[in-house]
Image: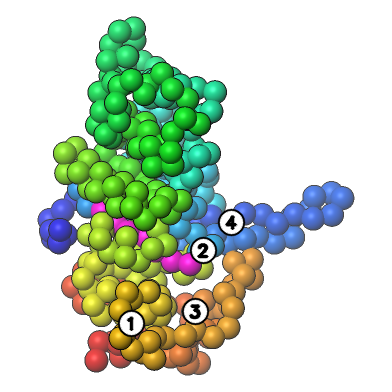
Amino acid sequence: MPQEENARALVEIRNLTKHFPIRKGFFNKECGAVRALSGVNLDIFEGETLGLVGESGCGKSTLGRVMLRLMGATDGQVKFQGQNIMDLDNKAMKPLRKEMQIVFQNPYASLDPRMTVEQILAEPLQVHSLFQGAALRAEAERLISLVGLKKEMLDRYPHEFSGGQRQRIGIARALALKPKLIVADEPVSALDVSVQAQILNLLVDLKNEFKLTYLFIAHNLDVVRYISDRIAVMYLGRVVEIGQTSQVYGKPLHPYAKALISAAPVPDPDFDRSSRIILTGDLPSPANPPSGCAFHTRCPMARERCRAEVPELREIQPGHSSACHFAEELLT
C-alpha cells in the first residue's frame, strides 16, 4: 500500500536517544555508555506497516521498547497522536497503554507459565476495568477465535501449545485492548518457515480488519518485504534509509542498505553471486562508535568527509530518504 501524501502520522519520533551506562569497580562508577539509539527521527503513519531492519545490536528492539515507554529515553520525543508521551507519568500513561501494544519475539518466554490462556487474555481487560464475570469469559473466547484457535483451549497452560500457537495467543493478548498501534518485535523469527507464513498472513488479515498500524521489526528481508508498506534501515543506533518498500529494494540509496539487500539469500542455483557486496571489517561497538558516519569503517564509498561529518537523513527522492553524503551517486 503506497503511503498517501495526506496521511497523518500516528507516531512522531524526534531525536530519540537511549544510552545504557557502563559501570565498573567497587563503587560501581559509570565509565561509559552503550549508545543504543543516537538521535532517531521517524514517522509512522496511520494504517501502514513500517518494517524496521538491520543487523543484530543496531537498536531495533530498543527503539520499539522506548517508543512504547517500556523503558525510558535518555533524550528526545515520542509523540503519539500529537502528544509527547515522554513527558507523562505512569498514571497519565495508563489510558494510552490501551492504544499501544507489543508482540514479543519469543513466544516461549512472553507468556506466564502459571496462568491459563483465559487468565492471560483476561489480565489486560481486568487491569483497565473493561469486562468482568461472564462477559470476561465471552471476550476471551472472541479473542482466541480471532487468531484461529478454539475456545476450548482457554483452559490450557502455555506449555501445552506449539510455538506458533503461543504466538497466536500473544497476538490475541495484544488485540485485547483494541489498540491502534502494535509493535511486532521479531514475531516470526523463532518459528518454523511454514508457521511463519501462517502468522504473517494472520497479521495482515488483522491489520485490514481492525485498521491497525504496525511497527514490524525483523531480520528476514523477505519477510519485511512481504508485509511492509515502508522500510526503515538502522545501523548502529541510527536510521540510515527509509522509503517505500519498492524504493528501498529497487534502488537502495545508502551503501549499508545496498549491502544488506545484496546479502539476502536467493533461491536460484543460477543466480550470479559474484554481484553480492561483501562488507569488510567488524561491526563497531556502540560503546565506542566511529566519528562522522558510523558506517565509514566498512563502507566502499567512504571519503574524508564521511570520517569527519555525521550525515543527515535527507530526502533524495519523493518519499525516499538516506543518511549518506553521496546518496545521489547511487541513483545512477
Residue 290: x percent and y percent? 58, 77
Residue type at mark 3?
Answer: Phe
Circle number at residue 19: 4
Circle number at residue 110: none
Q: Are marks 1 and 2 in contact (CB under 8 Å)?
A: no
- Regarding residue 229, the answer to whether it shows in the image is yes
Q: Secondary structure at mark 2?
A: loop
Q: Main secondary structure of the magenta part?
A: strand
Q: Is residue 64 left or right of residue 320?
A: right
Using the numbered discs, state the Cα–Cα distance from disc 4 to disc 3 in whole angstroms: 19 Å
Specify which label sits upstream in the sequence, 2 or 4.
Answer: 4
Specify which label sits upstream in the sequence, 1 or 2.
Answer: 2
Residue type at mark 1?
Answer: Pro
Using the numbered discs, state the Cα–Cα distance from disc 1 to disc 2 in whole angstroms: 28 Å
**Residue at (37, 46) in percent of width and height:** 183
Crowd class of label 3 (few under 14; some 14 to 19; many from 20; radius 10 Å): many
Residue 102: x percent and y percent? 39, 41
**Residue at (53, 39) in percent of width and height:** 109
Which region is colored magenta? Answer: 49-56
Q: Residue furthest right?
A: 26
Query: Which mark is in front, 1 or 3?
Result: 1
Circle number at residue 269: 1
- Magenta-drawn stretch contains 263: no
Residue, disc 3: 295
Residue, disc 2: 56
